Image: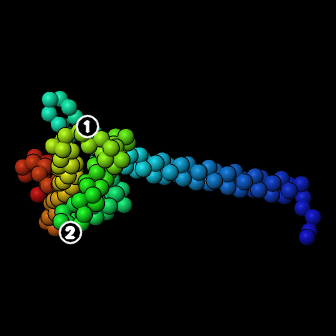
């Protein structure tokens, strides 16, 4: 390898330093991106645990229900519903299914299958039915809101496409009468 001059060594050192700085900046950017994505994942996980609403039991009494369930919980509730409605399944298994749905649906971590089973005489069946119905109503309402957003997005795309088909920018579609600066 030929011997480098002092200027060449300085230039080479500068290039190496610049590359090291670029690599460091790239690594820092990747770390920031990863942290951002990890915080998004944490938000999704938090919503499954903390997103709640309330079911009114009457007389100002309310109980917190969960609005965001994981896929596994939704599938479990679906299976439990089948058990609840099947008269061929023994009563104690149908009762377990009901209590398990209540445990999943309510936000209170102290309301478990065991609590419901051990405290049968400390809560009203009508209240628990209200909780289950309120939970299902909340789920239906969330799906309705999602469908409304989808329909709204679909209408926006359709309306925007119609304007573009006519050769008119959607920004200028109704910009005023002719002769006053409007589109023709």
Is there any visible trace of residue 160 in the rendered image? Answer: no
Residue 122 is marked as: 1
Q: Quadrant of residue 158?
A: bottom left
Is mark 2 in CB contact (under 8 Å) with mark 1? Answer: no
On-image quarter of the C terminus: bottom left
- Looking at the picture, how far across and down is residue 45, in whole percent? 42, 50
On-image quarter of the N terminus: bottom right
Q: How many marks?
A: 2
- Residue plotted at (18% across, 65% down): 87
Is there any visible trace of residue 99 in the rendered image? Answer: yes
- Residue 25 appears left or right of 178: right
- Looking at the picture, how far across and down is residue 154, in whole percent? 19, 61
Among numbered discs 2 and 1, the one appearing first in the sequence: 2
- Residue 180 appears left or right of 96: left
Q: Secondary structure at mark 2?
A: loop
- Looking at the picture, how far across and down is residue 74, in whole percent? 30, 59
- Residue plotted at (50% across, 51% down): 38
- Residue plotted at (20% across, 31% down): 61
Q: CA distance from mark 2 to mark 1?
A: 28 Å
Q: Quadrant of residue 9?
A: bottom right
Q: Residue furthest right?
A: 3
Question: Which residue has dot 2 on it?
Answer: 88
């Amino acid at each position: 390898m030929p011997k480098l001059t002092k200027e060449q060594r300085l230039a080479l050192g500068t290039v190496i330093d610049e590359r090291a700085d670029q690599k460091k900046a790239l690594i820092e950017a990747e770390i920031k991106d990863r942290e951002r994505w990890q915080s998004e994942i944490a938000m999704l996980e938090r919503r499954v645990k903390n997103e709640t609403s309330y079911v009114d039991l009457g007389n100002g009494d309310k109980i917190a229900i969960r609005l965001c369930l994981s896929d596994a919980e939704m599938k479990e509730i679906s299976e439990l519903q089948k058990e609840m409605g099947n008269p061929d399944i023994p009563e104690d298994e149908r009762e377990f299914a009901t209590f398990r749905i209540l445990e999943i649906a309510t936000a209170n971590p102290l309301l478990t299958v065991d609590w419901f089973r051990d405290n049968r005489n400390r809560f009203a069946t009508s209240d628990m039915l209200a909780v289950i119905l309120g939970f299902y109503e909340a789920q239906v309402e969330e799906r309705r809101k999602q469908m409304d957003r989808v329909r709204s997005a679909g209408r926006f795309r359709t309306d925007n496409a119609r304007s573009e088909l006519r050769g008119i920018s959607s920004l200028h579609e109704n910009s005023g009468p002719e002769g006053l600066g409007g589109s023709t």
